[in-house]
Image (cartoon, rainbow, N blue to C red):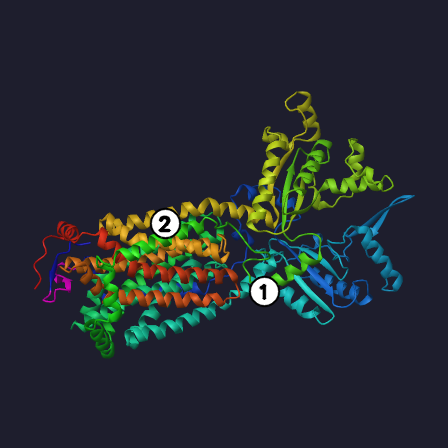
Amino acid sequence: MAEQKHHFSTEPEHYILSKETEPALERILFNNRMLVMIVLGLLTLLFAYGLTKVKLDSSIEKYIPLNHTFIQNYLVHKDDMKSGVANVKISIEAMEGDIFTKDYMETLSQINDEVFFVKGVDRSGMQSLWTPNTRWTEVTEEGFQGGPVIPSTYDGGPESLEQVRQNVLKSGQVGRLVSNDFRSSIIDVPLVEYDPETGEKLSYQKFSQDLEDKIRAKYGNDKYRIYITGTPKKLGDLLDGAKSIAYFFLAAMVMTAILLYLYSRCPKGTLVPIVASLIAVVWQLGALALLGYTIDLYSVLVPFLVFAIGISHAVQIINGIAIESGKGADKLQAARQAFRGLYVPGMLALLSDAMGFLTLLFIDIGVIQELAIAASIGVAMIIVTNLVLLPIVMSFIGISEAGVRHAKKTEKSEPKLWKAMSYFANPKVAPFPIVIAIVMAIFGYQMSQDLKIGDLDKGAPELRADSRYNLDNDFMVSNYSTSSDVLVVMVETAKEQCNSFKVMDAVDRFMWYMENVPGVQSTTSLVTVSKLVTKAMNEGNLNWSALSRNQTILNTSIQRAPSSLLNPNCSMAPVIVYLNDHKAETLETAVAAVEEFKAQYDDNIDEKYFGYTIAEIEQAIADKEIDSVPVRFQLASGNAGIEAATNQVIADAQDTMLIFVYVVVFVLCFMTFRSFTAVACILIPLALTSVLSQALMTYLGIGVKVATLPVIALGVGIGVDYGIYIYSRLEVMIIAGKTLQEAFLETLKSTGKAVSFTGVTLAIGVATWILSPIKFQADMGILLTFMFLWNMLGALILLPALAHYLLSPQRIIARHKARHGDIPPAG
């Protein structure tokens, strides 16, 4: 940037840059306006083409911290696990009577066949009363007898239905596939990761819609009610709900246009900022698509934020052009003057926004990292569209006469509100907002100590409690013995050793330990099957419901164990832990219990021994390399395991992210204003808002999770804009020779008006999110509304009070002289 020297007009409160020493960037842009417009037009066409390539992605992997130890352990055994996250459960309830009727069984059979052919279903793993892998077993005088629950001889008659009833009771599926009250049954549907026909990742949104159209809509009626749960279904419902974001975006545009017109009283000053901000959205989405990124549930909210940020900076530009036009400048000179006075604070504010977003990269979760990238690209686009395109377009069309008259009237008037607020910079009034801020900070800090990591509600916290999915989930939890919140612990050993006594005994002890942990309902593993079969082989005597030390008996007892309870080479046997819920406290307790047991029972031996065969293990024992078969408990799989890993990643990253965003904002502000006291005036109100927002989350019962953590960075990154614009203008007025209170009054009449308008407009826009069917969007709406308003109030109330104690007008003027030379006397 060229060195800038200042001279003053005859009006003491107004100084401009000398035309001979105008910034080089201004000369390049405004002396080549047509060329710049052509380049920007070509970029718009390019990104508009990219916009047609945007895809909505529902991949589960993006919502999982793939580099976390739990997930890495799960991925090692992913192909062997039958209880991963990509499972859906469909329950069919008889509204009258029970399931043992001919009509119910026929309906269940039809639904089973329908689901079997839905694209994305792993047909080999499907299970229901009609699939052959659902079997019953009993012990008779002649030995074991068994078969499929619904035999091949079933004909729907009374005798067949009674046989099915008996088979269900013998199958052990009551509370699992069949409800405890016998009024409903479940079809357990595992999914494939990739579409077998196209080879692309399965679209959970399409799969969810297929279930709605082919199952719920077709078979749900007065006689039968359909319930569908599972992570893929939840994601599908969320993606469907995300469509409402378009309506919120439209509502925000309409409200912004109305408020902007009331603010500027100029149709051109209303339309151009909106168009410029929309162009930034098109550029952002088009750039993402061209770079190979997709849009997901979280980044789909980013275009709205880009539009809102664009409007907030556009208001400053329009306000500056209107003020200069009111002072007699022509449309070109007014645009140049506005650009000249605002591009430095505008660039600083936008860089702070971008760095705030980029701090989200610290969180090792795909959706948050892509949100950070999407938002940062969006801010980069705003720098061009709103700090370059907007003033150049306005240099051609200018502010309307009505807008100029309104600007003149506003500039000359001294509203009572602004005059009253100027007293926050007065020595007699300044202590009060500071004392109040200290009290609020102490209260907020104390309250924020109870802030929890993770989900605090039952069901799917991303959706509202009365959403269809959560009502379905509540039905499942209330009518079946097995919880929908499952933590899977993988027990690793050597090949063909998962049924050895040492391994089975360790698993048995682990199950007993976990069943006595608060929040755990029950556990299931290979040991459960072994004990059940051993008891059955001994006339059902309960005394035999134990593990045998005889290896032959152990081998026999697990011959018919479900494939979900051991992998093909018997080197891993999962223990399925059913939890009461997936609340943060429940997950923390369960994981801590597993870690405590693991520390006592894990064999700390070389990794290679876990891959040994029987013969190699025997040889290693003979060679005294190891004492016995190795055993290791590994966390974690299941939906609860995934959420526990996610909570840990968020807990580890939140403080680092917050510290980094404040450090970056501090550095950027200091590089611009070269004053620690100036930076303190800008950042202290911001820090107060951060503390109060955490207190608000505690009060509202909102945990720190994937959906809410980005808001913390967004609130800091976007909220600093207010303080930067206010302080930048305040400093200009102080250099012009005004007292602090006079300088703040002039700041309020120009920049303060734009800041208050921006804060209210942004708050109103995101406040509409509170009505969203997606609860995490509603939570974000509440928090962002609060942060936008409080950051605005902090800049307008607390900043001038702090300035009274921290700023020295003499030092500001001296620093300005050192950087730009002597200031000619006013007039």
Which of the 4 image quadrants contains residue 186?
bottom right
Q: In the rendered image, is residue 497 in sight? A: no
| Quarter of the image that includes the C terminus | bottom left
Q: Label 1: which residue?
A: 467
Count of numbered tags: 2
Q: Is residue 190 left or right of residue 824?
A: right
Q: Is residue 467 left or right of residue 676?
A: right
| Quarter of the image that includes the N terminus | bottom left
Q: Is residue 15 magenta?
A: yes
Which of the 4 image quadrants contains residue 28?
bottom left
Name of the residue lying farthest toward the right: 141
Give the Cα separation between the discs numbered 2 and 1. 36 Å
Q: Position of residue 103 (x, y in %)?
A: 80, 67
Q: Amino acid at mark 2?
A: Val
Q: Is residue 316 left or right of residue 306?
A: left
Q: Earlier in the sequence, mark 2 or mark 1?
A: 1
Q: In the rendered image, is residue 814 in sight? A: yes
Q: Nearer the viewer, residue 711 or 357?
A: 711
Residue 116 versus residue 271 in the image, above or below:
above
Q: Label 2: which residue?
A: 661
Q: Position of residue 512 (x, y in %)?
A: 69, 39
**Label 1: which secondary element:** loop
Which of the 4 image quadrants contains residue 383?
bottom left
Residue 161: give its label: none
Magenta region, residue range: 9-22
